[in-house]
Image (cartoon, helix red, strand yellow):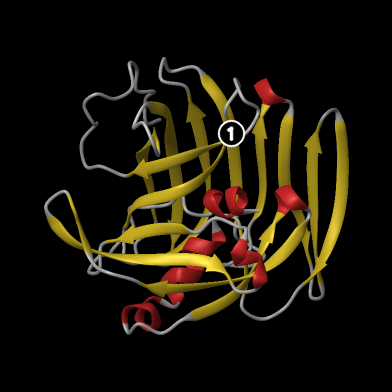
Amino acid sequence: MMRALLTCLMLTMIPTSHADQTRRFYGYAFDLKTDRYLYTEVHEQVWKDGRWVRGTIDYHAPDGRLRGTKTLDFSADPHVPLYEYALPDQGYAEGITAIDDSEIRLTKTSDGKQRFETVDRREQMTGDSGFHNFLLDHFKELMDRQTVAFTFIAAGNLDSYKFRARRIQDTQFEGAMAVQFKVEANSLLRLVAPDLTVVYDPQSRRLLEYRGPSNVIDPETGKVYEARIAYYSQPPQPGPATLPPLE
């Protein structure tokens, strides 16, 4: 469930104008405990009239090998995208396949089996990368230290859960002031589910860093990585042996 929430946070470089444009950038993932380099995210976002409308995320091993892909389409709901996410080397896939006025259809493939489920559509609901758009739409409330509650769709669990986000102590990123938001379960689930933290630029509202469960599976353990994912302005050192092109 928390790793599904992570997938929604792989988004940065917010355009500052309303011109249509395509944004391409990297995310750099490190092991949360050891700081070992894990993988590179390659993002492409298409923006129209100041809104993110569709995009892709590719996941590359440190040697540049492609491990996974995700496609996103926000035409049905700005906070709940239609999406397909796949890790072929793990035989894993998940997604949101349909959205209507009352229901949202989910799918998951693992262990050679594909399963489907539906969840009720409701107010203050988000899923996958639409979580980023949701935070931006509630950014002033968070900056004012209000707690924002929402329901998050976790296609990887074929279910939805109650969460909340709030501002915690400020920090710095690449020498500049940054704000931190803590995201946690808004139920007794928080007693067992891990928290996650996201760091934003308070002026541009650009996502700078994420800390928590990854959405990429460690091929050695079969479990998702616990990761720190940073959106640096320059490649880190040490970092990946090969950076895939921004095409």
Quadrant that contains the C terminus: top left
Q: Image quarter for residue 202? A: bottom left
Q: Image quarter for residue 228? A: top left
Residue ID for mark 1: 69
Q: Image quarter for residue 145? A: bottom left
Which residue lies at the image location 53% right of the left edge and 21% below the top edge?
A: 66
Q: Could you say which is closer to the camera, residue 21 or residue 127?
A: 127
Which residue lies at the image location 47% right of the left edge and 62% below the top edge?
A: 132
Using the image, determine if residue 44 lies above or below residue 123.
above
Using the image, determine if residue 63 lies above or below residue 46.
above
What x and y, as percent, mark residue 144?
32, 84
Determine crowd level at label 1: few under 14, some 14-19, many 20+ residues with C-alpha closer than 10 A: some
Q: In this view, does 151 lie to the left or right of 8?
A: right
Using the image, determine if residue 14 lies above or below residue 83.
below
Which residue lies at the image location 59% right of the left edge and 48% below the top edge?
A: 3
Can residue 227 be seen at all in this image of the molecule?
yes
What x and y, as percent, mark residue 198?
39, 58
Q: Is mark 1 on a helix, strand or loop?
A: strand
Q: In this view, does 2 lie to the left or right of 94?
A: left
Q: Which amino acid does label 1 sit on?
A: Thr
The residue positioned farthest toward the left in the image shown: 175
The residue positioned farthest toward the front in the image shown: 191
Which residue lies at the image location 62% right of the left edge and 33% below the top edge?
A: 223
Q: Could you say which is closer to the camera, residue 179 or residue 220?
A: 220
Q: Is residue 16 left or right of residue 176?
A: right
Q: Could you say which is closer to the camera, residue 77 or residue 207?
A: 207
Using the image, determine if residue 149 lies above or below residue 208.
below
What x and y, as percent, mark residue 203?
22, 69
What x and y, as percent, mark residue 31?
41, 34
Can residue 96 be seen at all in this image of the molecule?
no
